[in-house]
Image (cartoon, rainbow, N blue to C red):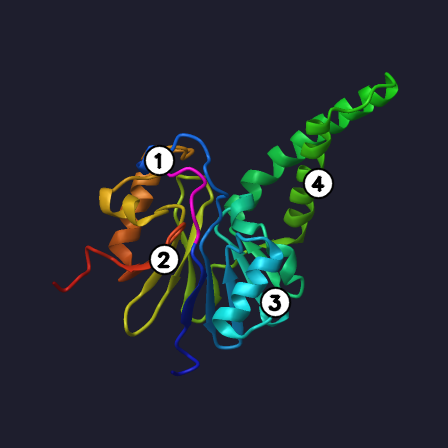
Amino acid sequence: MSRNVPELRVISIGALGAHPLRNERAPVRTGHATTTLITAGDARILVDPGLPAPAIAARLEERTGLSPDQITHVFMSRFHPECRRGIEAFGDAKWLLSEREREGVGVPIVESLKRLGETAQAAREAGEDLHEDQQAMIEVLQRDVAILQRTQAAPDSLAPGVDLFPLPGVTPGLTGLLVLRPSGDVLICADAIPTIEHLEQGKVLPTAADLDQARESFQEAIEIADLLVLGRDNMVVNPTKRPF
């Protein structure tokens, strides 16, 4: 295939911790995003490395023969742990996030860390130990801040034929990628369309920050692409585009 035509491969199929369309009200498994590799020219773009670093590195090698240091970009559809759990394996790559998502999550994370830091300082001054859950939360937030500081705002086009496709609703800055191919355009939907059940039933995640906006993004996704990479499922043919 020509180097000018982007290639796409699913590296790891994700899962919802709690699947609402199976009447799961609390997590019954570890949630993780579907991870996809896009190769476009000299760019190798890994999308949503949701598994832990050793696991996603192993899946990458199994599926493509590539090692983490051969990835040039990591794109996060949203700043959620289940979309970036293994990101530190790709220290040589550029880490990218949509500008709106980056700006939207940065201030709340910093404010939460500041409040916990003040709580920790007060506990020390009183000669008390910080609760284990509070200490754990500080460590989580410190990691979040470190990742966010390392992350750049993604440009509108990551490579020839690979463009940002905003899908707000689940979060205000949720963003997919539209991959333009002569054989049919592919949209990496992320959690705008998480599973095949959501696609077939026309449902969005009930935890969306803005349900009306999430429904609009769902509709835009199925109008634009021939193939869909679902946020917690495989790549599927868009049922509205089938020729039969």
Work out how far the residue at label 3 is from the one at label 2, CA to CA, in angstroms: 22 Å
Q: Earlier in the sequence, mark 4 or mark 2?
A: 4
Image quarter in which the N terminus is found: bottom left
Single out the residue that lies furthest toward the bottom: 2
Q: Residue at 35% across / 68% down in the picture? A: 180
Q: Are marks 3 and 2 in contact (CB under 8 Å)?
A: no
Q: Are marks 2 and 1 in contact (CB under 8 Å)?
A: no
Q: Residue at 26% across / 62% down in the picture? A: 226
Question: In the image, what residue type sits under mark 4?
Answer: Gln
Badge 1: residue crowd in 10 Å (few <14, some 14–19, many ≥20): some
For the record, the magenta segment spans 14-19
| Mark 2, residue position | 234
| Mark 4, residue position | 142
User: Residue 58 at x, y = what percent?
Assistant: 57, 65
Disc on res. 68? 3
**31 and 108: which one is in front?**
31
Single out the residue that lies furthest toward the left: 244
Work out how far the residue at label 4 is from the one at label 1, CA to CA, in angstroms: 31 Å
On screen, residue 62 above or below 48? below
**158 and 205: which one is in front?**
205
Question: In the image, what residue type sits under mark 2?
Answer: Asn
Q: Nearer the viewer, mark 4 or mark 3?
A: 3
Q: Earlier in the sequence, mark 4 or mark 3?
A: 3
Q: Is residue 178 left or right of residue 184?
A: right
User: Residue 123 at x, y = what percent?
Assistant: 81, 20
On screen, residue 55 above or below 70? above
Question: In the image, what residue type sits under mark 1?
Answer: Pro
